[in-house]
Image (tube, rainbow, N blue to C red):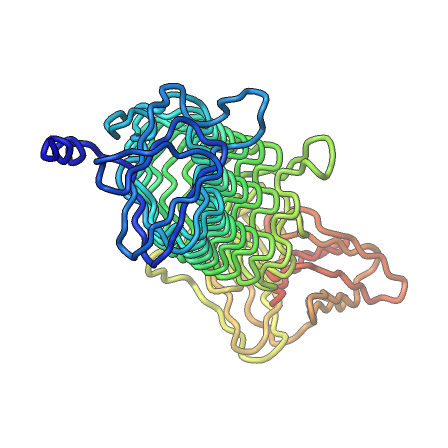
């Protein structure tokens, strides 16, 4: 008889609690049909609310089972309380959680919504989680199941490939000792399925794999919020995004140094909102390849990334939706590095500020690619304030020049251009001459014609003297920046970023490099 009982116990996979220190205890709040055994299944006792089961010695075990085909939560539809284990001391769980459903731990189908929700909520005595073998999930089934288990260091395997609404929401929130988590095999997501799943897991260093390629609304919303030890983000292969799918996903991941690629070309409202907010270790943003944006899609995305110094985008308009709060890039670069490089299409309007290009950053256009091992015609100034005068007689529109070693190229004007440089600086020229042209020489003087017009820069301000009437300023792609009118004869034009600018007076065009 005893042999048969032992065989039956070994053939099942009961949820098991093992004491890791003397006099550890467990009990239950809002008990369903549950039973426990302290003698390897020889005898069973009902576990009811108010009971305190004592595991007297380290290594003592309790087996648990139940027959709850309708699940173990919300048995009373009028009640707002949940079934919740209560523990003291140190207890390691093992075996299958499903023995509470079928009495044996064999089923892989969770029978009801919220089935295991909050089951170990705030069990600070729990040091090891049980097996979670279910492959068929339900809405909210594991919501907050281990939330607040501050001594849990490893998460159990999660084999399901299809997720349900809120199924993993806050599942390990505030598990501050959690270091190991399994890869998530799910390829079919649901609304808010992983919402705040690892919220404030401050010891987590490596994220799980996330293979899904089609997002659901808020599916990864705040998933790693506050994971301050996370150094590398998982790959995010999704090409179809959804509203808020990556909302504040890595918020305050202060050790994160490498961002994942973001391959989606068409975005959804708030999909990347605050995604890397306060990631102070991030120096380079992921390439933002999307050409079609949406309401608040990049809002607050890089706020407080104080070391971020490079952003590359593919969109060609800033755009707003009704008001400032719905700006697509609202507050996206607050408190980033004071200097950096912004790479964008040439037809993106040159705007600077917290909603646009970071103030103080250089701008480079995607269309102006570097040439491998170039051999450009180069003219070098031998003394300060030398000028190169260019007369484009034959409209050689394919000719352009660079003042920054080929980073930025400026098309040659049809008529006269004046390029002013300092000693040791070089001017590169390239292109195809479509008809005859004449190039002047470095003249070694700031005088550009019979009328003296001088241009110089200092601390982000362009000064122009000797010009009559209005002086207008354009960026190097020809877009208008500002106009100066000065009766005193000295014009001041303030710019918000380094780069090449074009000064136009009544009869001259002068290019100047602001460093």
Quadrant location of the N terminus? top left
The residue nearer to you, when weighing 375 against 279, is 279
Is 96 situated above or below 312? Answer: above
- How far across and down, in percent of the image, does residue 364 sit? 52, 53
The residue nearer to you, when weighing 54 against 490, is 54
The residue nearer to you, when weighing 428 against 161, is 161
351 relative to 112 in the view: left or right: right
Determine the residue positioned at 12% across, 35% down: 2
- How far across and down, in percent of the image, does residue 266 sit? 49, 31
Task: Looking at this view, name the residue that lies furthest to the right.
Answer: 487
Task: Name the image quarter holding residue 137.
Answer: top left
The residue nearer to you, when weighing 415 against 337, is 337
Task: Looking at this view, name the residue that lies furthest to the bottom.
Answer: 383
Quadrant location of the C terminus? bottom right
Determine the residue positioned at 56% across, 47% down: 301
* Residue 500 seen in the figure: yes
Is 335 situated above or below 320? Answer: below
- How far across and down, in percent of the image, does residue 18 sit? 30, 49
- How far across and down, in percent of the image, does residue 313 sit? 51, 45
* Residue 437 seen in the figure: no
């Amino acid at each position: 008889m005893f042999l048969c009982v032992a065989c039956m116990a070994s053939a099942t996979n009961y949820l098991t609690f093992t004491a890791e220190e003397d006099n550890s205890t467990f009990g239950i709040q809002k008990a369903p049909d549950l039973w426990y055994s302290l003698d390897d299944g020889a005898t069973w006792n009902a576990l009811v609310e108010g009971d305190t089961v004592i595991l007297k010695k380290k290594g003592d075990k309790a087996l648990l089972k139940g027959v709850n085909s309708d699940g173990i939560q919300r048995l009373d539809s009028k009640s707002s309380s949940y079934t919740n284990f209560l523990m003291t001391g140190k207890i390691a769980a093992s075996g299958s959680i499903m023995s509470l459903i079928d009495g044996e731990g064999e089923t892989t189908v969770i029978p009801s919504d919220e089935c295991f929700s909050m089951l170990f909520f705030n069990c600070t005595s729990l040091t090891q989680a049980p097996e979670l073998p279910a492959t068929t999930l339900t809405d909210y089934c594991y919501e907050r199941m281990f939330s607040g288990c501050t001594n849990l260091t490893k998460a159990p395997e999660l084999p399901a490939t299809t997720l349900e609404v809120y199924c993993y929401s806050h599942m390990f929130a505030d598990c501050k000792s959690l270091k190991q988590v399994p890869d998530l095999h799910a390829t079919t997501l649901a609304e808010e399925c992983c919402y705040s799943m690892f919220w404030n897991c401050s010891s987590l260093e490596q994220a799980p794999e996330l293979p899904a390629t089609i997002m659901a609304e808020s599916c990864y919303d705040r998933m790693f919020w506050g994971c301050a030890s996370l150094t590398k983000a998982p790959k995010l292969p999704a090409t179809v995004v959804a509203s808020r799918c990556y909302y504040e996903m890595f918020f305050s991941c202060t050790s994160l140094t490498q961002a994942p690629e973001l391959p989606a070309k068409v975005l959804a409202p708030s999909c990347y909102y605050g995604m890397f907010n306060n990631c102070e270790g991030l120096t380079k943003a992921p390439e933002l390849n999307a050409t079609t944006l949406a309401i608040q899609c990049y809002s607050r995305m890089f706020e407080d990334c104080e070391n971020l110094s490079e952003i590359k985008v593919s969109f060609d308009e800033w755009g707003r939706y009704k008001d400032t709060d719905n700006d697509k890039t609202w507050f996206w670069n607050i408190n980033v590095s004071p200097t950096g490089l912004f790479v964008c299409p040439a037809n993106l309007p040159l705007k600077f500020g917290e909603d646009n290009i970071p103030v103080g950053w250089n701008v480079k256009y995607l269309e102006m690619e570097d040439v491998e091992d170039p051999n450009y015609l180069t003219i070098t100034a031998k003394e300060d304030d030398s000028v190169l005068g260019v007369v484009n007689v034959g409209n050689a529109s394919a000719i352009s020049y660079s003042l920054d070693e080929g980073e930025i190229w400026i098309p040659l004007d049809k008529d006269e251009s004046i390029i002013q440089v300092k000693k040791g600086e070089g001017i590169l020229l390239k292109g195809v001459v479509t008809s005859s042209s004449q190039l002047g020489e470095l003249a070694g003087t700031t005088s550009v014609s019979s009328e003296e017009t001088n241009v110089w820069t200092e601390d982000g301000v362009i000064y122009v003297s000797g010009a009559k009437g209005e002086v207008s300023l354009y960026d190097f792609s020809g877009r208008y920046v500002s106009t100066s009118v000065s009766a005193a004869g000295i014009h001041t034009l303030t710019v918000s970023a380094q780069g090449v600018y074009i000064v136009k007076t009544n009869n001259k065009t002068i290019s100047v490099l602001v460093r």
